[in-house]
Every structure is written in structure tokens, then in C-alpha cells.
Amino acid sequence: MSDYGTVKPFASSEVEKRPDQNVSTSLDTNGENIVRNDWTREEIAALFDQPFDDLVFQAATVHRANHKAGEVQLSTLLSIKTGGCPEDCGYCNQSAGAKSGLKAEKLLDVRTVLQSAAQAKDRGSSRFCMGAAWRNPKNRDMPAIIEMIKGVRQMGMETCMTLGMLTKEQSEMLSEAGLDYYNHNIDTSPEHYEKVITTRTFGDRLETLENVRNSGINVCSGGIVGMGETREDRVGFVHALATLPRHPESVPVNALVPVKGTVLGDMLADTPLAKIDDIEFVRTIAVARITMPASMVRLSAGRESMSESTQALCFLAGANSIFTGDKLLTTGNAGDDADETLFAKLGLVPMAAEQRDCALEAAE
Ligand code: SAM
Ligand code: DTB
Ligand code: SF4
């Protein structure tokens, strides 16, 4: 199988018959939503393998049965502790081992973080996501982290944090502070994981997700497409998320931002794999939407170098969340002006925090 699956549209001069449409869906015969956690890899591979228009149509149908079409949730990111990370994630310029020239910084003070959150709120964002370049938070960092959560919540915004691995006790502390979401990505398939990161295991990731889930915080977990993985790995990646005991409430799908000086940025530079094929990226979004119908699917990193039409296809295929602003954690993002233009062209509107909660409750 090629990296982009088994459909060979121009393989011969014969007119090819399109595959039978007997693929699994998450809608029952009345169009009602069924949340399934028993997806097989074969079923997920069959979803990916469909003709593109069938796949996107199916994903859009599932999307409309579970969410208000045209509404997109907006989150803003802030790096609260940048660089110098002891982990060796091959995609990340914040790893101490990366030679990207990024300057390591200490944990920001609470006031600075709250000022950024207030600006994000003024620009229409409903969720503030704070990220730290840590393997795990130290107990001495927890008081400041807790103050940040409480302060952002007091402004009426949802809070999200991504701080690396958490113990049960740390998850409980964050939950008690009122943290709404914790982001912890599985990043890729279990098989591809060790080719990208050696300082922790896929199992370590699942353990933190379990701690977060058990402490009652909403789970945000997804990964990166375009790290030189195969179609089979993308199937395994979606399968790992869609078979969790409970689907993540948010599923960020990032397109690799190839940064010079990182293992993957340098390895993939000037190869055909340097940029994920747009159609394959949209397919991944669509399959995530179909298999996790009630979750928010976030079109995450990589939008800065994505055309408007590819982004429009992602929204059609069920993406209903983005990061706003001109910066992600350390790299560039599309920016508010570009997004305002895009939303106006496509007739998309920002989703209010309460509406998001209703959509989830309705689907549960
Ligand atoms: N250190 C924490 C951790 O790894 O869990 C939190 C921060 S980390 C930067 C958050 C996520 O950003 C990673 O799990 C990865 O999926 C994504 N990410 C990092 N660098 C990226 C890049 N160059 N392109 C796309 N996504 C990236
Ligand atoms: C996620 O899945 N994507 C965001 C968020 N979770 C923390 C981070 C993307 C980071 C892209 C590289 C950077 O800006 O440093
Ligand atoms: Fe550290 Fe997170 Fe970057 Fe990995 S992704 S190097 S854990 S900041």
C-alpha cells in the first residue's frame, strides 16, 4: 500500500468501478448519533480508503447530526514556559536537544499570563490554553499554575493546560483548581511513536490521559500528521483515540510545522514528505470526525501554510475548532486578520463556550 492508501484513480485506462459504500458509520439508520469505542483498524482503514467525496460527505453528515454546522470554537495559546525541555520529541523546537536557536525561558509570572488571557478574551477567544515545555510539572510549580487557572476562569474563559505527564495527585490538584481541559497528545500510532520520541513511551501518555480522565478534567488529545508516517500509522493514530474508554472531548489534529534544527524538520526538509498532502490531511480530519462524532475536532498547527481552500475542506469534513492569534506556542499561526477574512468568506461564526457544552451534552 502507498502512504496514501489503496484508491488508484488513474491506475488504468479502464473506467474503474467505485468501491461499494458498505463502510461503517457512527450514525444509525435514523441518522441518530452512536458513540462507539469498539472501532477496528480495518473499519478505520476502510473509511480512509473511500473516494474523497464520499468520505467528506459522510463526515459532514456526522458533523451536522452532532454539532451546529458553521460554528467554530476559538482557543488561544500561550507558552508559559518556553524551551529547554528534557524530552527528545523529534518534531519539537523546545527540546533542549534541538538546534533551532530558541531561547529557553523561565515560567512566566501569573500577572503576565493573566494579561495575555485578557487580550485573548477581547479578541473573541473562549478558551485560553497554557503550554509548558516540561516533561512533567514539579510540585514547586503547582501553586503558580493553580493561580493561573483560577485567574483565567475568573475572567469567564475556559482554561486548558498542557504541562507534560501528570501524576494522579497533580491531576486532582488541577481539577480542584477548576481546570476545564488538559491537553496531552498521543501524537501518532503506537508503532510510529518510538521513531519520534525515545524519552517516554506511548503507554506513559495513556497513563496521564487516564489520570486526567479520572480526576474529572475534560481530555484534549490528538496528534501530528506529516511526520513521515504511513497511512497505516494514521489509521493506528485515529484508532488509538477512538477506542479510548471515553473519547477525548477535544481532538487536535496538527500538521507538522517543520522547524529547522529539529530532528524531523531537518530529516524531512527537501523530501517529498516535507509537507503532508492536503487531501490526506483532510481525510484524517474526516475520519476523526466520523469515529469520534461528539468530540470537537481542532484544525490545529500548520494553518499558517495551509491554503484557504484546504482549511475550508477541513471545516466541511467536520473540523469545528481552531487556534486563533498570530502565534501558536513558539511558531507562527494564521493570525486574526486572516481568520476574520476566512470566516467572512466561508460564513463561519465563532462558537460561544456555552453552545459547545450543549453540543456535547446532547451527544452524550
Ligand atoms: N510539553 C508538553 C507535552 O509535550 O505534552 C506540552 C507542550 S507540547 C509543545 C504540545 C503538543 O504540541 C505536542 O504534543 C505536539 O503534538 C504539538 N507540537 C509540538 N511541536 C509541533 C510542531 N512542530 N508541529 C506540530 N505540532 C507540534
Ligand atoms: C496541540 O495539539 N497543538 C498545540 C497545543 N496542542 C498545545 C501546540 C502546537 C505547537 C506548534 C509548535 C509551536 O508553536 O511551538
Ligand atoms: Fe518537551 Fe512537549 Fe516539546 Fe516534547 S513536545 S520536547 S515534551 S515541549
Image (tube, rainbow, N blue to C red):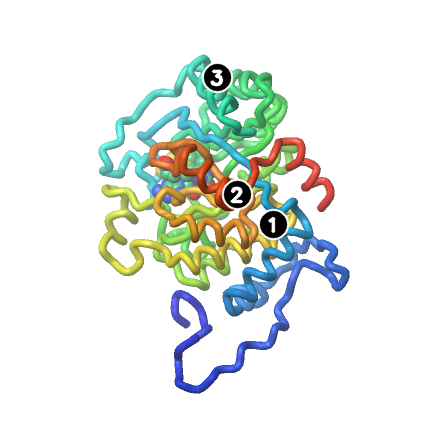
- Foreground residue, 349 or 360? 349
Q: Which residue is mark 1?
A: 244
What residue is shown at x 39% (from left), y 65% (from top)?
Answer: 3
Q: Residues within 10 Å of mark 2 (few under 14, many from 20)?
A: many
Q: CA distance from mark 1 to mark 3?
A: 34 Å
Q: CA distance from mark 2 to mark 1?
A: 11 Å
Q: Amino acid at mark 3?
A: Leu
What residue is shown at x 54% (from left), y 20% (from top)?
Answer: 152
Q: Is residue 9 in view from this perspective?
A: yes
- From the viewer's perspective, is the residue at label 2 or at label 3 nearer? 3
Q: Amino acid at mark 2?
A: Ser
Location of ligand 3 given as a quarter of the image: top left
Q: Residue 289 at what x, y percent from top left?
A: 58, 53
Whether disc 1's CB lies below 8 Å from ligand 2 is answered no
Comes first in the chain, label 2 or label 1: 2
- Foreground residue, 11 or 13? 13
Q: Give SS at disc 3.
A: helix
Whether disc 3's CB lies below 8 Å from ligand 2 is answered no
Q: Which residue is mark 2?
A: 221
Q: Give SS at disc 1.
A: loop
Q: Residue 287 at what x, y percent from top left?
A: 55, 58
Q: Amino acid at mark 1?
A: Leu
| Left or right position of 49 against 24 | left
Question: Which quadrant holds residue 230?
Answer: bottom left
**Residues at discs 2 and 1 in contact (Cβ within 8 Å):** yes
Q: Taking 343 as reference, is 239 above or below it?
A: below
Q: Outermost residue toward the right? A: 30
Q: Outermost residue toward the top? A: 111
- Foreground residue, 223 or 23? 23
Comes first in the chain, label 2 or label 3: 3
Q: Which residue is mark 3?
A: 114
